[in-house]
Image (spheres, rainbow, N blue to C red):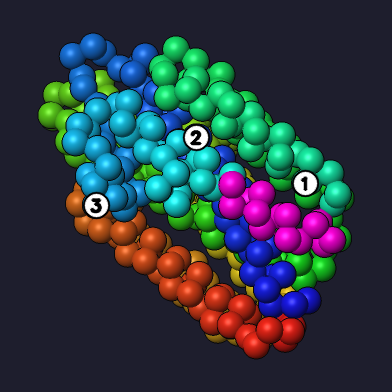
Amino acid sequence: MLSRVAERLFWAGRYLERAENTARLVRVYDELLFDLPRDIKISWYNLIEINSGTEQFEQRYKVKDERNVVKFLLADDTNASSMLSSLKMVRENIRTTRDVVPEEMWELINELDMYARQNIKQGINRSGRHDFLNTIIEGCQKIIGLLAGTMTRDSGWQFLIMGRYLERADMNTRIIDAAVSLMLQSEAEESVRLGQVVWAKVLKSQSAYLDYRRTVRTSINGAKAVTFLLRDPFFPRTLSYCLEQIREAASKLPRSGIITAKVDKLYGYEYPIERSEDLNEKFHDYLNDFQLDLIEINHQITENWFHFRQGDAA
């Protein structure tokens, strides 16, 4: 496979996952507004901070309110990680690799991109946000289902899977980080009321609520929810599962040793979490370091397979 084609498939997987996960992140914060007591305030600006977008956001907006944060995350064309920007990049990467993906994918991504752009005001305005975000999430899952059901498991598939699960692992840590930041900002008496609601919403944002109940078989608290989302080896949105999928996909490609070694190093380290109080500033720093490690894996994938002379194979 040409290295440029491999790179486009890798980024198509990343951007498709990013579009879905951005919608999930906004949806979980939106739902918190309805379930938290009125006297507990949540800061939407947390979402800008955990997505490392503070400098870019502050260049564009003076007010750090809900509307501006949601607009920046969903619709801002100057934000390369916004939902609309991500869908645009999926469309562009698929347009240039149509001969190696199922032909129906081009139609589906066009439909989803068009729907998002025509109805983006529903996502920015709170009244129609829930239905809009659900449609985006379902549209992304429809494309992923098409790929899973009809794409040959060749090298193109492996690059797409690596991109998809690298992005998912990154967003997994960011969603957890958003909840940890919210809990750390709350007063001691608030945290008791806040904890169960927040962690239930985090699990639901990852479609993990029922699986958590079946697997953990106990009430929801921060320590158990985070442990599940980080370490469960079977649920497809946990950090452990994502790392294993990246490792497995890389191992089926040539010159994969350095990638699998980096993933194994991450996979082998588990942050000790025994109680919810362990989800503190040190844990926040651990998540930040983990995100930097994922960036390094992305860099190594690029160096290993994509930086070739034109015409070389990945």
> Which marked residue is nearer to the observer: mark 3 or mark 2?
3
Q: Position of residue 179 (x, y in %)?
A: 32, 38
Quadrant where the C terminus lies?
bottom right
Residues at marks 2 and 1, CA–CA distance in whole angstroms: 23 Å
Name the element at disc 3. helix
Q: Position of residue 130 (x, y in %)?
A: 51, 20
Chain-order first, disc 1 or disc 3: 3
Q: Residue at x 45, y 36 (%)?
A: 75
Residue type, numbered disc 1? Trp
Q: Position of residue 216 (x, y in %)?
A: 51, 37
The answer to which of 210 and 10 lies nearer the viewer is 10
What residue did someone put label 3 on? 55
Q: Residue at x 59, y 26 (%)?
A: 118
Residues at marks 3 and 2, CA–CA distance in whole angstroms: 23 Å
Name the element at disc 1. helix
Residue 120's tag is none
Q: Would you place residue 312 above or below residue 276 in this image? A: below
Q: Main secondary structure of the magenta part?
A: helix
99 in magenta: yes
Q: Residue 72 lies in what quarter of the image? A: top left
Q: Residue at x 42, y 19 (%)?
A: 125
Q: Residue 119 lies in what quarter of the image? A: top right
Residue 24's tag is 2
Question: Dot 1, how many residues are within 10 Å of its Cα: few (below 14), some (14-19), or many (20+)?
Answer: some
Question: Dot 3, how many residues are within 10 Å of its Cα: few (below 14), some (14-19), or many (20+)?
Answer: few
Magenta-highlighted residues: 88-101
